[in-house]
């Protein structure tokens, strides 16, 4: 901690909102004081940096939130070292019931000086754009599901069902609705056409976004493409799933262990222990919800027999032996784990959550293996050069 304090003369806390930023500064061995409120504009931030630039270097921080990483990128561009802090991990005094922007900024400055704050991963602009695109596709899938539910329930209320057996929402099913379903009441016919149009619109939206994701990955840096290809060696992890994982995680090497990565996904069990008593509960969910959803979807595939089908075999072509070895181990272990928990009488959702947690470890192992191999190769190339 002494070395940490010696490195910086001042520690600046920023409480960031859409239009304003509350600023506080903590001197290395002195007081913590408020510097007031500035506008959240590029010009005001430049003036603030110019005002704070004096004898000795300084460091700034602010909490991650809806304002994103724009302020971080602006400060880094101006030569300021900045941290984006995990809000849930900021220490708060018990019994403190007064919350203002000024006090929040002072608490951040004080915590930064003490070294008690936990930074989050900040992607670059290109990676952030990929994540926005993946999350837009996720939102479109949710809207598509809602549109289908509305149409399905509408048909069910009126007793309209196909005479022959067919899978819902296939092209054949939609054609049956358009061709066979008619209503005597004009109002019901209008509702049917509107619901059908919404289902078609949401399907087109999902298709456009998936095409954009494909094109974005083709233009992505080589290191991202390699990780996406390697993750597809796992059963249940196709291209869109792999892209979603990489978009949410960024770098796998920033996690020291598989358990740390599980904690990032919020899939580790909560614990309430005291003395000799140890009690565990449900998963913490204090992590990336988007990543956790994708992992649970992939975990559902693990109940099938661990056979290397043609699709997975094709995805494994050209991958390193180490990646294929990890994927093979995962395929057999996760299937056995799935069946074992089912035989113990565990509810299916709990089983899927537990399998998803173990799948986290294999994903981390593959991602880290690819990143470390690229690092070794780049290091050897530098030595050769």
Image (tube, rainbow, N blue to C red):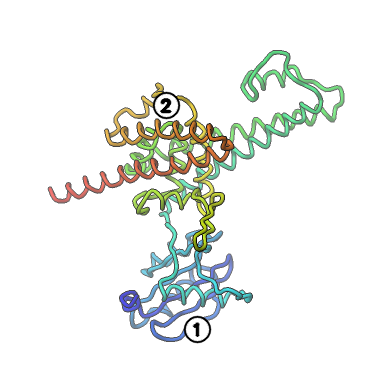
Q: Residue furthest left?
A: 384
In front: mark 2 or mark 1? 2
Dots 2, 1 in contact, CB < 8 A: no
Q: Residues within 10 Å of mark 1 (few under 14, many from 20)?
A: some
For disc 1, the marked residue is: 33
Residue at 82%, 28% (x, y): give it: 188
- The residue wearing badge 2 is 306
Q: Is residue 330 above or below residue 9?
A: above
Q: Is residue 382 left or right of residue 166?
A: left
**In the figure, 328 relative to 282: above or below?**
above
The picture places residue 109, in percent across and down from the top left corner, at 47, 75
First in sequence, mark 2 or 1: give its number: 1
The image quadrant where one finds the N terminus is: bottom left
Say which of 276 and 382 sits in front.
276
Give the residue at x 53% y 42%.
293
Q: Position of residue 207 (x, y in %)?
A: 54, 32
Question: Is 259 in front, or is 68?
Answer: 259
């Amino acid at each position: 901690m002494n070395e940490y304090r010696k490195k910086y003369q001042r520690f600046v806390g920023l409480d960031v909102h859409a239009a304003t930023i509350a600023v506080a500064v903590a001197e290395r061995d002195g007081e913590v004081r408020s510097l007031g409120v500035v506008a959240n504009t590029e010009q005001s931030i430049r003036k603030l940096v110019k005002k704070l630039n004096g004898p000795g270097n300084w460091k700034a921080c602010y909490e991650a939130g809806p304002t994103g990483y724009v302020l971080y990128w602006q400060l880094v561009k101006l030569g300021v070292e900045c941290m984006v802090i995990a809000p849930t991990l900021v220490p708060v005094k018990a019994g403190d019931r007064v919350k203002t922007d000024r006090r929040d900024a002072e608490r951040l400055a004080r915590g930064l000086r003490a070294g008690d704050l936990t930074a989050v991963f900040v992607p670059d602009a290109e990676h952030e754009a990929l994540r926005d695109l993946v999350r837009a596709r996720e939102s479109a899938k949710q809207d598509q599901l809602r549109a289908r539910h509305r149409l399905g329930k509408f048909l069910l209320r009126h007793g309209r069902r196909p005479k022959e057996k067919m899978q819902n929402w296939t092209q054949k099913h939609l054609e049956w609705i358009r061709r066979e379903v008619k209503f005597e009441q004009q109002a019901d016919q209008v509702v049917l056409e509107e619901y059908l149009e919404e289902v078609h619109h949401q399907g087109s939206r999902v298709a456009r976004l998936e095409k954009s994701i494909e094109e974005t990955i083709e233009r992505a840096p080589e290191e991202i493409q390699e990780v996406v290809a390697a993750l597809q060696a796992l059963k249940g992890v196709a291209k869109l799933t792999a892209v979603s994982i990489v978009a949410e995680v960024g770098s796998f090497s920033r996690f020291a262990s598989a358990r740390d990565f599980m904690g990032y996904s919020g899939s580790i069990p909560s614990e309430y222990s005291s003395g000799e008593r140890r009690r565990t509960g449900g998963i913490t969910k204090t992590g990336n919800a988007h990543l956790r959803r994708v992992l649970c979807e992939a975990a559902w595939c693990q109940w099938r027999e661990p056979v290397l089908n043609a699709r997975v075999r094709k995805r494994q072509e050209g991958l390193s032996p180490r990646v294929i070895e990890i994927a093979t181990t995962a395929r057999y272990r996760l299937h056995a784990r799935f069946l074992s928990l089912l035989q113990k009488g565990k509810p299916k959702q709990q089983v899927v959550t537990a399998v998803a947690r173990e799948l986290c470890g294999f994903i981390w192992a593959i991602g880290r293996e690819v990143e470390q191999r690229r690092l070794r190769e780049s290091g050897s190339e530098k030595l050769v050069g």
